[in-house]
């Protein structure tokens, strides 16, 4: 299946893109998408303990199952306000 | 005048618009909070800040914060606007208004809202200072973290 990955802030810089497509095996979770991404881009894996994720613009657990066409976003620690 | 309660925008914030989004005949008090870009941070001279957000999720998160506040203070209405893009020193980055029949709940809910924005809103500061730049990374956003929610509530009521 193919998912759209959205990245923000430092993660966006590490990947050099705000949005990209990721091919994943059927039954993959958000964590699976993250690990595929972290394998592609050096420096990303160190964020794993600190990231949040959202699926289709809703906060989600990394254990959430993904489906073809989903938009999964990975968020570094936030600093709004 | 806009009355959109939850908003991410590249435009300058208008505190009057945020206030008007919550005002009504039942309200005896409106409190507001405006966060500004300041010229020093962690010993650095700040030049400007680029704000980035996941707009769709941020606006839903603001609505979620308002729902949480309504569960604590049933008569309170909240509005939260956050700006994105390049902000200069003194520019308003966030504007919050809380309306209630009574001032005590309005003050508490307003404080609760800014604490929760800092904990869970998908917004990031890229600080540019004299001699460099840095992404500010605060809390790992987890809206379901009960301890964080309680901490925000305690600050709101202290």
Image (spheres, grey):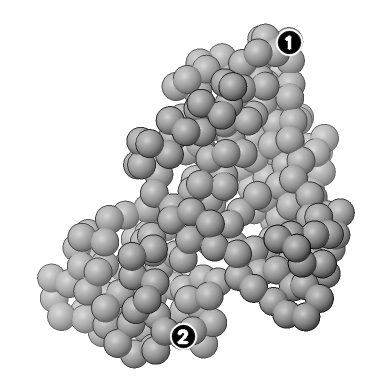
B90 to B125, vertically: above or below: above
Q: Is residue B81 above or below residue B78?
A: below
Point 53% across, 57% down: residue: B138
Instruction: Look at mark 1 in the image and give the residue it sits on.
Output: B28
Q: Secondary structure at mark 1?
A: loop
Q: Chain of mark 1?
A: B
Q: Quick one: quadrant of the N terminus of chain B?
A: top right
Above or below residue A40? Residue B58 is above
Nearest the viewer among A66 and A62 is: A62
Q: Residues within 10 Å of mark 1 (few under 14, many from 20)?
A: few
Q: Position of residue A43 (x, y in %)?
A: 42, 84
- Quarter of the figure with residue B22: top right
Q: Is residue A25 above or below residue B137?
A: below
Quadrant in which the C terminus of chain B is drawn: top right
Q: Position of residue B30 (x, y in %)?
A: 74, 21
Query: From where the camera sits, is residue B56 visible?
Result: no
Q: Residue under circle 2?
A: A15
Task: Identify which residue is drawn at 62% across, 39% down.
Answer: B114
Q: Are marks 2 and 1 on the same chain?
A: no
Quadrant for residue A52, please give it: bottom left
Residue found 66% across the figure and 19% down from its top: B106
Left/right placement of residue B18 relative to residue B68 reads right
């Amino acid at each position: 299946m193919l998912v759209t990955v959205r990245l923000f802030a430092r993660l966006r810089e590490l990947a050099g893109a705000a949005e990209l497509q990721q091919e994943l095996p059927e039954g993959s979770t958000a964590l699976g998408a993250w690990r595929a991404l972290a394998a592609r881009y050096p420096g990303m894996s160190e964020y794993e303990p600190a990231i949040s994720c959202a699926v289709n613009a809703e906060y989600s657990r990394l254990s959430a199952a993904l489906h073809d066409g989903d938009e999964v976003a990975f968020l570094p620690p936030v600093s709004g306000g | 005048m806009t009355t959109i309660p939850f908003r991410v925008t590249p435009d300058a914030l208008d505190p009057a618009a945020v206030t008007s989004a919550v005002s009504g005949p039942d309200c005896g008090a409106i409190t507001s909070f405006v966060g500004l870009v300041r010229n020093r941070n962690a010993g650095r001279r700040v030049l400007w800040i680029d704000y980035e957000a996941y707009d769709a999720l941020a606006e839903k998160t603001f609505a979620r914060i308002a729902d949480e506040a309504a569960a604590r203070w049933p008569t309170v209405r909240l509005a939260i606007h956050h700006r994105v893009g390049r902000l200069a020193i003194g520019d308003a980055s966030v504007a919050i208004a809380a309306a209630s029949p009574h001032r005590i709940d309005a003050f508490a809910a307003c404080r609760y809202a800014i604490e929760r924005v800092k904990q869970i809103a998908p917004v990031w500061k890229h600080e540019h200072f004299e001699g460099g730049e840095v992404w500010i990374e605060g809390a790992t956003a987890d809206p379901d973290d009960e301890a964080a929610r309680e901490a925000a509530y305690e600050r709101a009521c202290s």
